[in-house]
Image: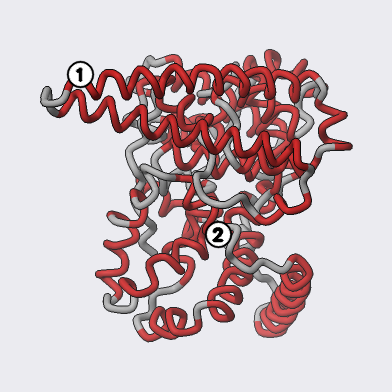
């Protein structure tokens, strides 16, 4: 199985804060129609902010690229920046209020909160908002962290080998003695000790690495523990990887139902879903998109769970169906590696919009889950009849392939 290669992550503080503050220039997502006039006005302000950000960056590119008309470029940039500063101030005040009045927002302003998260959490608020979203702000396990670091783990050698290949282009993780590699090792080792069944699994380091870009290691550890416990990630990373099989099964159903022609083409070329989608679920697109885009998806994941992975995955296939239908297996593999990762670099808002145009039925997904469990149970019974002692399915086939991306 050949999985897509990792897009080189480049996340400077400036680009990430601009990106996180951006809002879709397109029409609001599905829940907007249920918002009050004041809330809609707030969303409109955020969309205006996004337009100004775009105008500002275009003006700066124009200035840098050519000195012709430099006077007008400077005026344009200055004007956009001036208006933007007021909107940025509004956004800071808004998110500061959300963080301080969190329980109130979760209880009474859930629709607006969902819309704001889909538009991107500002970079400087991500650490606290992610912790609040997964209820990781006051976890007893945090007090165990320093003691866990004094212990030894049987996974240490494997973790050491992999962390050098996690975000190798990112400044924070560059070099064997970098602070990033050291704290990443610490968090992965600590988790392997509190959850010995899972221990360490390739792919999980990308998720922890992203958390460490936003917050101190103790906090990142608590968020990761919560994600593993409450967001289906633990089931994905268990040695049997049964949950990954379920996700692929559910995704294939959506593909067959919504893009039947592309599904037929994939089958005719023996281009299996696991060949391109496994890393989407195991690393939440962190090994697919550059960081500014992947982090926007992660914002939504923190609030809405794995549903966003299904939505974004199918949206990518919808956007690229015509091109993929013209390619053979090797051509499609190259297309997934080289073209798809960078299609939304300049406008991740379009990706979010397209993701919420995808049909997703939670009840149907639940039914598929039961169907898959029954199918697997029957397979297990048949295996036991043939061979009394059957070992657990090895995760190597899936997880080790992530190493090829790094």
Split into 4 quadrants, where in the image is the C terminus?
top left
Q: Which mark is residue 71?
A: 1
Compare residues 20 and 250 and report the one nearer the observer.
Answer: 20
Coordinates of residue 28 in the picture (x, y in percent): 61, 50
Give the residue pinned by disc 2: 394
Instruction: Please determine whether, in this image, residue 395 is positioned above or below residue 157.
Output: below
Q: Secondary structure at mark 1?
A: helix
Instruction: Please determine whether, in this image, residue 300 is positioned above or below residue 398.
Output: above
Name the side, left or right, on which 298 lies relative to 137: left
Disc nearer the start of the sequence (2/1): 1
Coordinates of residue 266 in the picture (x, y in percent): 40, 79
Coordinates of residue 9 in the picture (x, y in percent): 37, 35
Name the side, left or right, on which 397 lies relative to 104: left
The answer to whether the residue labelled 2 contacts the one labelled 1, judged by CB atoms less than 8 Å apart, is no
Distance in Å between CA atoms under marks 2 and 1? 64 Å
Of discs 2 and 1, which sits in the foreground?
Answer: 1
Q: Residue at x 69, y 27 (%)?
A: 129
Split into 4 quadrants, where in the image is the N terminus?
bottom left
Q: Residue at x 38, y 67 (%)?
A: 320
Can you tell which quarter of the image residue 113 is in?
top right
Q: Which mark is residue 336?
A: none
How was the colour assigned to the protein in this rendering?
A: secondary structure
Q: Residues within 10 Å of mark 1 (few under 14, many from 20)?
A: few
Q: Residue at x 39, y 33 (%)?
A: 167
Coordinates of residue 283 in the picture (x, y in percent): 52, 46
Q: Residues within 10 Å of mark 2 (few under 14, many from 20)?
A: few
Compare residues 259 and 58 and report the one nearer the observer.
Answer: 58
Can you tell which quarter of the image residue 220 is in?
top right
Q: Secondary structure at mark 2?
A: loop
Compare residues 43 and 362 and report the one nearer the observer.
Answer: 43
Q: Residue at x 57, y 27 (%)?
A: 122
């Amino acid at each position: 199985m050949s999985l897509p290669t990792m897009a080189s992550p480049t996340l400077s503080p400036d680009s990430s804060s601009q990106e996180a503050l951006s809002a879709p220039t397109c029409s609001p997502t599905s829940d907007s129609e249920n918002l009050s006039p004041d809330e809609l006005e707030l969303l409109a302000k955020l969309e205006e902010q996004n337009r100004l950000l775009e105008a500002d960056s275009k003006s700066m590119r124009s200035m840098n690229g050519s000195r012709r008309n430099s006077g007008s470029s400077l005026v344009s940039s200055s004007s956009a920046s001036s208006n933007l500063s007021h909107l940025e101030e509004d956004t800071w005040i808004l998110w500061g209020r959300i963080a301080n009045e969190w329980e109130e927002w979760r209880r009474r302003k859930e629709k607006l909160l969902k819309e704001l998260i889909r538009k991107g959490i500002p970079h400087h608020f991500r650490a606290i908002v992610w912790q609040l979203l997964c209820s990781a702000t006051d976890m007893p396990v945090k007090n165990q962290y320093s003691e866990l670091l004094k212990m030894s783990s049987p996974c240490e050698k494997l973790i050491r080998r992999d962390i050098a290949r996690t975000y190798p282009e990112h400044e924070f993780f560059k070099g064997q003695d970098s602070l990033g590699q050291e704290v990443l090792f610490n968090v992965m080792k600590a988790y392997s000790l509190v959850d010995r069944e899972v221990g360490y699994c390739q792919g999980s380091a990308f998720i922890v690495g992203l958390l460490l870009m936003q917050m101190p290691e103790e906090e990142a550890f608590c968020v990761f523990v919560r994600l593993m416990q409450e967001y289906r990630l633990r089931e994905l990373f268990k040695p049997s990887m049964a949950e990954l099989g379920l996700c692929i099964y559910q995704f294939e159903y959506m593909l067959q139902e919504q893009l039947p022609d592309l599904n037929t083409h994939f089958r005719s070329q023996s281009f299996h879903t696991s060949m391109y989608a496994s890393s989407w679920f195991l690393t939440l697109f962190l090994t697919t998109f550059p960081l500014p885009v992947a982090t926007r998806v992660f914002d939504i994941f923190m609030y809405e769970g794995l549903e966003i992975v299904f939505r974004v995955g199918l949206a990518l296939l919808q956007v690229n169906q015509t091109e993929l239908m013209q390619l053979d297996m090797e051509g499609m593999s190259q297309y997934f590696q080289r073209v798809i990762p960078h299609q939304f670099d300049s406008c991740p808002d379009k990706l979010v919009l397209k993701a919420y145009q995808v049909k997703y039925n939670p009840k149907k997904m639940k039914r598929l889950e039961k169907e898959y469990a029954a199918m697997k149970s029957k397979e297990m019974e048949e295996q036991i009849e043939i061979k009394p002692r059957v070992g657990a399915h090895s995760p190597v086939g899936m997880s080790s392939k992530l190493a090829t991306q790094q």
